[in-house]
Image (spheres, rainbow, N blue to C red):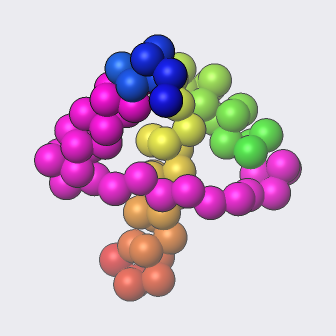
Amino acid sequence: MSRTLTPVRERVAAQRERVRAAGRTHLYTDLPNELIVAIDRLKEERGVSSRAPIIEEAVRLLIAKQQGT
């Protein structure tokens, strides 16, 4: 194993542990390109640095709608 990869893997592992400690989980999924374009447009409009808050809000809204709240 390359010596340069080990620090990267350690940093990634540490980041994943911080995410878990914060009560969050990574979710990996494929989405159609048109959804990604729409998410990126919202991301730019809102000035957020990643797609995660946009997707999180969309999922929360869907769940609230389904639960009738």
The answer to whether 64 is drawn above or below residue 36 in the figure is below
Q: At 41% from the left edge and 53% from the top edge, which residue is drawn?
A: 26
Q: Residue furthest top?
A: 4
The answer to whether 42 is drawn above or below residue 27 in the figure is above
Q: Quadrant of residue 30?
A: bottom right
Instruction: Write down the region rendered in magenta.
Output: 8-35
Q: Would residue 23 be counted in the magenta stretch?
A: yes
Choose between 20 and 31: the one closer to the eye.
20
- Indicate the position of residue 44 as horizontal and vertical percent values: 63, 23
Q: Would residue 54 be counted in the magenta stretch?
A: no
Is residue 23 visible to the viewer in this orientation of the structure?
yes
Tell me if 42 is positioned left or right of 57 in this view.
Answer: right
Tell me if 51 is positioned left or right of 7 in this view.
Answer: right
Q: At 84% from the left edge and 49% from the top edge, which residue is drawn?
A: 33
Choose between 65 and 5: the one closer to the eye.
5
Tell me if 33 is positioned left or right of 6 in this view.
Answer: right
- Quadrant in which the C terminus is drawn: bottom left
Is residue 15 visible to the viewer in this orientation of the structure?
no
The answer to whether 56 is drawn above or below residue 6 in the figure is below
Q: At 56% from the left edge and 38% from the top edge, which residue is drawn?
A: 51
Choose between 64 and 15: the one closer to the eye.
15
The answer to whether 46 is drawn above or below residue 38 in the figure is above
Q: At 43% from the left edge and 17% from the top edge, which residue is drawn?
A: 3
- Indicate the position of residue 57 as horizontal and vertical percent values: 45, 52
Q: Residue furthest bottom?
A: 67
- Indicate the position of residue 47 as horizontal and vertical percent values: 53, 20
How many marks on residues?
0
Instruction: Name the dominant secondary structure of the magenta segment.
Output: helix
